[in-house]
Amino acid sequence: MLVVGPIGERAVVVEVAGLGAELTGQLVMQLSLAEVSDRITYLFDAGADVDAAAAVRRQVPVLGLRAKLFGQSADAGRYWRAADVVVARPRSRAIARAMLVGARLLALVDDEVPGAARTVTALEQRGRGAGARGILLVSSGLEALLRASPPPPAADGADHVVDVVWTVASERRAVIEERRSAARAETHSRLKDATAAAAAAARQSAVAGDLEDLGGAPAEPAADIPGEADLASLAREAAERKQQLVRDVDAARRAGDHANMHRLLQELAALDKELADLDAATRAARAAGVKPGANGGPRPAAGTPRPPPQDRRPPEDPLAELKRKAASSNRRSSASVEDELAALKRKMSETSKKK
């Protein structure tokens, strides 16, 4: 476990990885010249830089700094979170880590980082750090940052994550409720259609009683009553919808959503009534002699003779019929001509005999 020091002391993380032995030695020397060095614990992050780590081990005891050294460690993130100020080159990774832990950045400006001066200007304008334009200005820059009040804590994104989770969960609940409502509406529609078909069939096939008005437009043919299998499937579907409604009512009661609970109770009562209506209409249709799977259209009375069977032979081709009539007419014409010729010959023969 990391122990920084007595209450009131400050911690400074110094990223020396990549600086090399010479520049690391100069940096440690400048840090020791700061007036606040006796009240600071330095945490040197050498990463995988062996030369920088060796320079820190060699210089710190000589200069009398209170410091600790770490590198490639699983606890590196915890050490960075202890920092009030971070001393590092203004690379994007170092800037992001400093802002994440709420520390100001003392940026080492040199030619190793492109655009370092512009980055430092942006940090200074936002009150998030300062620049040391030269190794000799590190001690004064560190003192200035430590004297300033700590920067306000920056949002770490947790609130945005919570908003996203809440929004997705709300949308998911809305989608589930929409799908359930659509399924329940379909069940209500099927129940009403089946009830209407059974009731219409019962009315059309019922024994005549009181005076009925048969005027007006002819009634449309009744729809088929669902078959036994369809009625059983519809009953199972309605039972599943009832179970889901009961669960939704209980969830709304536990959540204190009384408005939604009363709405679901009304829908549950409506579903029970529709099931009762369907059962009554189906029993009435069966009593009238209409079986499920049939409609209530008029049936022939007992003893009524069946109509004679119709000739089911295919009709004759009209062209063939026309040809047949034409041939018959031609034959009759030929016979008439021959008869006239024979009569003319007999008449001529009789005239010659008389002369």
Image (cartoon, rainbow, N blue to C red):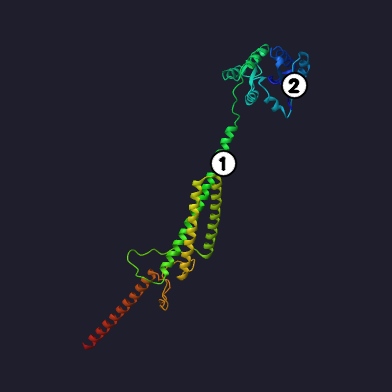
Amino acid type, callout 2: Lys
The CA span between labels 1 and 2 is 46 Å
Identity of the residue drawn at 21% across and 88% down: 354
Residue 163, position as x, y percentages in the image: 56, 35
Is 225 in front, or is 249? 249
Relative to 123, is 277 on the left or the right?
Answer: left
In the displayed structure, would residue 173 be above or below residue 112?
below
Q: Nearer the viewer, residue 271 or 140?
A: 271
Q: As drawn, which residue projects farthest toward the bottom?
A: 354
Residue 27, above or below 303: above
- 66 lies above or below 318: above
Quadrant of image for the N terminus: top right
- Sequence-wise first label, 1 or 2: 2
Q: Amino acid at mark 1?
A: Ala
Residue bearing mark 1: 169
Question: Residue 321 lies in what quarter of the image?
Answer: bottom left
The one nearer the camera, 273 or 296, is 273
Of the pair 324 and 110, the residue shown nearer to us: 110
Specify whether 296 is left or right of 328: right
Q: Under tag 1, what secondary structure?
A: helix
Coordinates of residue 130 in the picture (x, y in percent): 62, 16
| Viewer can see residue 105 | yes
Report which residue position mark 2 lands on.
68
Disc 2 secondary structure class = strand
Looking at the picture, how far across and down is residue 54, in whole percent?
Answer: 78, 19
Few, some or many residues within 10 Å of mark 2 (<14, 14–19, 20+): some
Relative to 249, is 66 on the left or the right?
A: right
Query: Residue 166 at x, y = what percent?
Result: 56, 38
Q: Say whether residue 48 is visible.
A: no
State whether residue 147 is above or below residue 252: above
Dot 1, how many residues are within 10 Å of its Cα: few (below 14), some (14-19), or many (20+)?
A: few
